[in-house]
Amino acid sequence: MSSSYLYFSIFLCAVFTFLTRILAFLVFSRVEPNPTMDYLKRHLPVMIMTILIFYALSGTNWNQTKGIPEILTIILATLLHLKMKNALISIFSTTVFYMILMQTIF
């Protein structure tokens, strides 16, 4: 495979990615907001996070650790997010907290 072929492929991928992203803004900028989209915009992040929590807990080995590190991490994430209102701080700090728990205590 020649390098010009790779460069051309990367260029095409970049162009089509840009077009698909900008197309959504061009098409939906003239659409009137409807109640269903407003409802989804307000409630979908919480629904997705709830599903992710249950999915993450489904792989927990309840016999070995009794789920203590997972539950402590969920509590910490909830408290941090309610206090700081910053998803990145909540995600990164609880990931570090969970890894420290799993590597040192459990």
Image: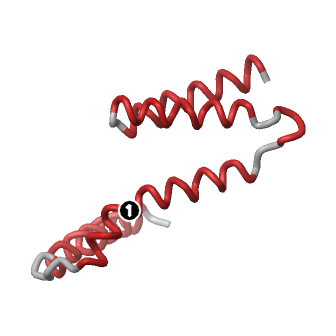
The location of residue 25, given as percent across then percent down, is 17, 72
Where residue 96 sits, quadrant-wise, is top right
The location of residue 1, given as percent across then percent down, is 50, 66
Q: Is residue 25 above or below residue 83?
A: below
Residue at horizontal 65 percent and vertical 54 percent from the top: 54
Q: Does dot 1 land on a helix, a strand or a loop?
A: helix
Residue assigned mark 1:
43
Residue at horizontal 57 percent and vertical 33 percent from the top: 75
Q: Among all residues in the image, which is located at the extreme left? A: 30
Residue at horizontal 44 percent and vertical 30 percent from the top: 80
Q: Give the crowd class for mark 1: few <14, some 14-19, many >=20 residues within 10 Å.
A: few
Residue at horizontal 41 percent and vertical 35 percent from the top: 81
Where residue 39 sits, quadrant-wise, is bottom left
Identify the amino acid type marked 1. His
Q: Is residue 21 above or below residue 45?
A: below
The location of residue 17, given as percent across then percent down, is 31, 69
**Horizontal relation, residue 3 to residue 64: left or right:** left
Where residue 11 sits, quadrant-wise, is bottom left
| Foreground pick, 85 / 26 | 85
Quadrant where the image shows the C terminus? top right
Q: Indicate the colouring scheme.
A: secondary structure
The location of residue 13, given as percent across then percent down, is 35, 69
